[in-house]
Amino acid sequence: MLDDFMTRALLAGIGTALAAAPLGCFVVWRRMAYFGDATAHAAILGVALSLALSLPIFAGAMAIALLMATMVTLLSGRGYAMDTLLGVLAHSALAVGLVTVSFLTTVRIDIMAYLFGDILAVGRDDLAVIWGGAALVLALVAWRWSALLTTTLNPDLARAAGIDPKREQLVLTLALAIVVAVAIKVVGVLLITALLIIPAATARPFARTPEAMAVIASGVATVSAGAGLHASYAFDTPTGPTIVCVIAVLFCCSTAVSGIRRLALRG
Amino acid sequence: MTALVETLGLTVRLGGATILDRVDFGIERGEIVTVVGPNGSGKSTLLRALLGGVRPAAGQVRRAPGVRLGYVPQRLVLDPTLPMTVARFLTLSRRVSRAERAAALEKAGVPDAGGQQMSALSGGQFQRVLLARAILDDPDLLILDEATAGLDQPGAAAFYRRIEEVRAETGCAVLMVSHDLHVVMSASDRVVCLNGHVCCEGAPEVVAEAPVYRALFGEGTQGALALYRHSHDHRHDRAGSEARIREAG
C-alpha cells in the first residue's frame, strides 16, 4: 500500500494535520502566530546546516527551531516589543538560512522543496518520522492539556493550582519545534503557520469548549490535507500551497456561516 | 497558632526597584485579612510572592505543609478565540462531579451559570464564577486580588457578603487586596496598610449604622463595607479621600 506515492503523501498530510491542529489552537489562544512563524523560518537554517554536515534534516530543523524558540523566550521583555523582536529574528534566520544554502556547492538542492514542501516525494522513512513526531506532539499536548489551558487563561491561576507556567511554555515550545520539523516536508517552512492557525480559526465559531475546538480543527486540517492533495493532482498545482488554499476556503465558509447565524439571531 | 502562609523579612526587587522592603506578614486559619495600599505599593507582588510566582531578593515565604490555596485573580482576560463554558472552566484543574460543580456555583451565588459561555457573563457574574472555581478545591486560604475592582459599591458589598458566607461555611481564611485605602470589607479581622513596607495594621471601624456612613455609601450595602482609619502619620497619594474620611468620622 505504501508503494503508491499518493498514499504516502496522503498519510504524511494527515499525520501533519493531526499534530498541527490541536497545537494550533494554543497558538491562536495565546496569540503566538508570529512566534510560530519565527520558529518555522529558522528551520530553513537548520535544513542548510543539516545538509552541510550530512545530518538528518529532521534533527537539524528541530534543533534550530528549538534554539530559535528559546532565544525568543529569553530575549522577550528586554527592550524590544515582541513583534519587532520576532520580525528581526524570523527574517534574519530565513535570510541566513538561504545564504548558507547557496554556499553548499557539493550538494545541489531544490530550495523550493523546503520553502513550500514536497509532499509527493515523501518516502517510507519520512513517513515514519512524520508519524513518530505527530504521535509525540499529540501525546505531549494531551498529557499537559489541562495545565496548558490553565496557564493560557492566567499564569497566577496556574501557580495557585501548583502548575509552573514556565514549564508549560517550554512544553508548547518543544511541541512547536517538533511540528515545524515534521511539516517541512509537507507544506514547507513558509506555510507551516497556516497549518497551525487556519484550522483553529475555522473551528472557533462552532466550538463551545476548548476540546471541541481542537477536535473540529483536526477534522478541518485532515479533510483539507486530503482534498488539497487530490486538487493538486487534478489541477497539476503545487501540493503544499493547494492544501493551504483548501483550508483558507473552509475558513471563509466558516466565517460566512457564523456571520449569517449571527444575523439570523439578531433578526 | 501557626500561620497558613507568612513572609519573614520579604524583600522583592523588580528591574532594580525595590517593590517590597522587609515585609513581615502572616495569615492564620479562618482569619479575614484585607491588604490596602495605593497603586504600586506592592500589594499584587505580595500576593504573587505568597503564590510562589516571585523570587525574593531577601527574606522568605513560608507555607504551612499541605496548605491549599484558592486564587481569584484581579481580572481574567479571556481571549475571544478561546471557547469556554462555565462548567468546563470549573473542571479545568481536576475532574469535578456535576453535584460539586452545582454546589460551588450555588455558594458563589451564580447557581444557573453552568451552561453559559464565560464571555457572555457580566462583570459581577464573572467574579462569582472565579470565586466558585477557587472554592471548588476546598482551600484553606482564599486569595482575592482586587476582586471587586470592576464592580459598583452595591456589587462589591454583595460580593463581600458572599465571601463572608463562604468563610462561615468552609472556615477558610481569606486574604484580599484592595486599592481602596479607606473602604474595606467590614468582616475583616485585620487590615494591613502596605506601601512597600507595612505602614500600619488594625481592625476596621464598623460604622454601618451612622447616618454619615449611609450618606457616603448609599443604601443597599447592608453593612458589608467598613472604614479603615490609618494610624500612621504620613499621607499616601490621596489627600482628598483622607479629608473625606475625617469629615465622615
Image: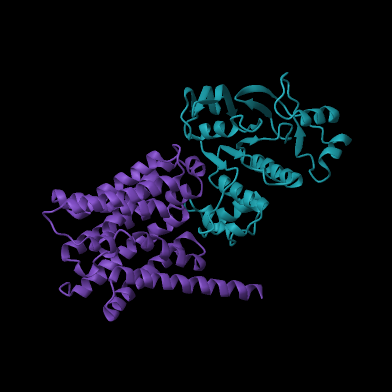
Chain A: colour as depicted: purple
**Whole-percent x and y of residue A61?**
25, 52
Most distant residue in the bottom direction? A234
**Whole-percent x and y of residue B69?**
53, 38
> Which chain is represented by cyan in the image?
B
Q: Please, is residue B171 above or below residue A64 in the view?
A: above
Question: Quadrant location of the N terminus of chain A?
Answer: bottom left
Q: Residue drawn at (20%, 53%), measured in percent from left and top?
A: A101
Question: Quadrant location of the C terminus of chain A?
Answer: bottom right
**Whole-percent x and y of residue B113?**
62, 58
Q: Quadrant of residue B157?
A: top right
A224 or A105: nearer the eye? A105
- Residue B64 visible in the snapshot: yes
The reply, left or right, for residue A243 in relation to residue A4 is right
**Whole-percent x and y of residue A223?**
36, 73
Most distant residue in the left direction? A106
The reply, left or right, for residue A113 in relation to residue B72 is left
